[in-house]
Amino acid sequence: MLSGMPIDLKKVKPKDIDKQILRIGLIAELDAINLYEQLSAMTTDPVLKAVLAEVAEDEKEHVGAFQYLLLQRDKEQAEELEEGKEEVLEILGKKKKK
């Protein structure tokens, strides 16, 4: 579980600080999603299960917000994300190789 900063932001170039902050936010949100979904799966209390599942959904929205902002600020990241999508489509046979 993320309980501290995964990188020393003081060592990050000023031009890259916001991108790194967004990545840290993504890490934290993904970690929270995993935690809440695991806890939801473990509990037998239906109310607690529902609340934990709802909180996990909220965290997924946060992932979307951070990812959107990151892709706006890091064009290379956006391109690589698209490359990854293309690779999966090729594996699934839904797109011809270039």
Image (tube, rainbow, N blue to C red):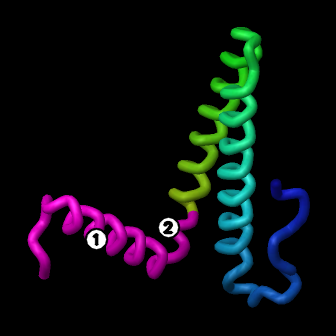
Question: In the shown orientation, is residue 63 left or right of residue 17?
Answer: left
For the residue pair 39 and 53, the one nearer the viewer reads as 39
Question: In the shown orientation, is residue 34 left or right of residue 70?
Answer: right
In this rendering, the label closer to the viewer, 1 or 2: 1
For the residues labelled 1 and 2, the Cα–Cα distance comes to: 22 Å
Please state the horizontal and vertical placement of residue 39, each as a whole percent of the image: 75, 31
Query: Is 54 covered by the magenta stretch?
Result: no
Please state the horizontal and vertical placement of residue 65, each as a whole percent of the image: 58, 50
Report the residue at 61% width, 56% height from top. 66
For the residue pair 91 and 12, the one nearer the viewer reads as 91
Residue 33 higher or lower than 23, as above or below: above
SS for tag 1? helix
Q: Where is mark 1, residue-wise?
A: 87
The range drawn in magenta is 70-98
Query: Is 72 covered by the magenta stretch?
Result: yes
Report the residue at 70% width, 72% height from top. 18
